[in-house]
Image: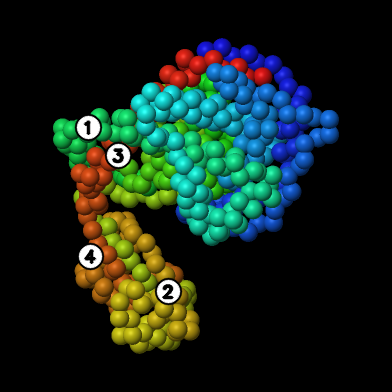
Amino acid sequence: MKRYLSGSAALGALLAGLLTASSVIAQPAEAPVGTAPAEAPAAPARPLPQGISESVAAVVNDDIVSTYDLAQRMRLLIATSGVQPTDENLQQFQREALVSLVDEHLQFQELRRVEREQKIDILADETEVTEEIAGMAQQNNMSGDQFLTFLAQRGIGPETLRDQLRAQISWARWIRGRYGSRLRVGDDQIAAAQARLSAEAAKPQYNIGEVLIDASRVGGMPQAMQGAQQLVAQLQQGAPFPAVARQFSALPTSAAGGDAGWVGAGEMPPEVEAVVAQMRPGQLSQPIPVKDGVYILYLKEKRAGGTAMLVNLKQAAVGLPQTATPADETAARAKLAALKPDIKSCATLEATAGKVQGVIAGDLGEAEVADLAPQFREAAEKLAIGEISDPIRTQAGLHLVAVCGRRAASAAQVDKQQIEQRLFGQQLSMIARRYMRDLRNSATIETR
């Protein structure tokens, strides 16, 4: 593979035009590190500077990637990732956009070669691409036309999005069609995974979002680390994690906004596992270097392992300081005692209690029985599910406590089908990444 690097005044001027206020597309999935408004005011795209003409940004086996293509892809990344362009991260956008365009040219070249040789249709047609756009628009509470108008207001032509989606749909179809039927996740692999999970059942489990910056794709570990650091900074400033994962992550979970679901010990790289064990729910990690690149994690939830008993509690409470008079305490007890018969279930507790002046109701979430305050622990151990305690006195006040769920921590096991799907996805993702690496290594790529 040959690469020729040189400066480009035309490209620099085009990129400078991207440093403009930019609103982002709201993400339908839960956006743990910030969300964007669905109908933010449009920022007009900056026109090409006068005297600057379109030029060549790269040549991929004689296919040309123009500076216009590159600027368009950068605008699309900005609009759909929620990462705001700055002087510091503009080079990352340029690198990601150029790498994506080069990869897509290689994919289209390979797919057309296969179509010619095997006389089959692989490339997605216009209907498929339009359906994908409609799905994206629906996720953002827009019609297809509104979605394309949203992009047009940011200087993004419809073919920029259509080309990206056509490449994604077609390449995924080819990889799954060529290798999916050959991959076999054996019963021994599933049994080994189940045995490992059972052995690790005493350890905590984590519900995580994940992003992997693939070092081989972006030019090496230094570039991957730099890119990850810039993404973390943007996530901390409010960029939606799902949107960032969809545009930048090399993992198969990118299609789901980086949502990896519940994972346990042994299911993550050791470097990642060591970091997530120290994180708190709601926390975003710093970049984590691993063998193939750099991880970014978002910890959504954490649950205990082992044989610990977990309970889900709700409460209705009256605030009462320790210095309250006996008369105040008697009145508060009477108020809660009168309320208790009206609460028919956990589902109605908050609404029912909310009608009584001076009573505060809420969901206390899931916790280990052993970690509860002594007064609540006794209720959690003795009450049946759906049953409500008598008023309990704490330093904060008086509480009615309802047990809304109870389970052993080790009961949340991943079933055989989930394990098989995860192993299949991991193998297919590894094959796809190797395939792309081989295409890059055998191609003639000139960037200018």
Residue 115 visible in this rendered orientation of the protein = yes
Label 2 packing within 10 angstroms: few (<14), some (14-19), many (20+): many
| Left or right, residue 340 beside residue 101 | left
- Image point (25%, 41%), residue name: 419
Q: What amino acid is at disc 4?
A: Glu
Label 2: element kind: strand
Q: What amino acid is at disc 3?
A: Arg
Label 1: element kind: loop
Label 4 packing within 10 angstroms: few (<14), some (14-19), many (20+): some
Task: Give the Cα distance between marks 2 and 3.
Answer: 40 Å
User: What residue is pinned by disc 2?
Assistant: 361
Task: Give the Cα distance between marks 1 and 3.
Answer: 12 Å
User: What residue is pinned by disc 3?
Assistant: 422
Q: Is residue 317 above or below residue 282?
A: below
Label 3 packing within 10 angstroms: few (<14), some (14-19), many (20+): some
Among numbered discs 4 and 1, the one appearing first in the sequence = 1
Among numbered discs 1 and 3, the one appearing first in the sequence = 1
Q: Is residue 151 above or below residue 64?
A: below
User: What residue is pinned by disc 1?
Assistant: 184
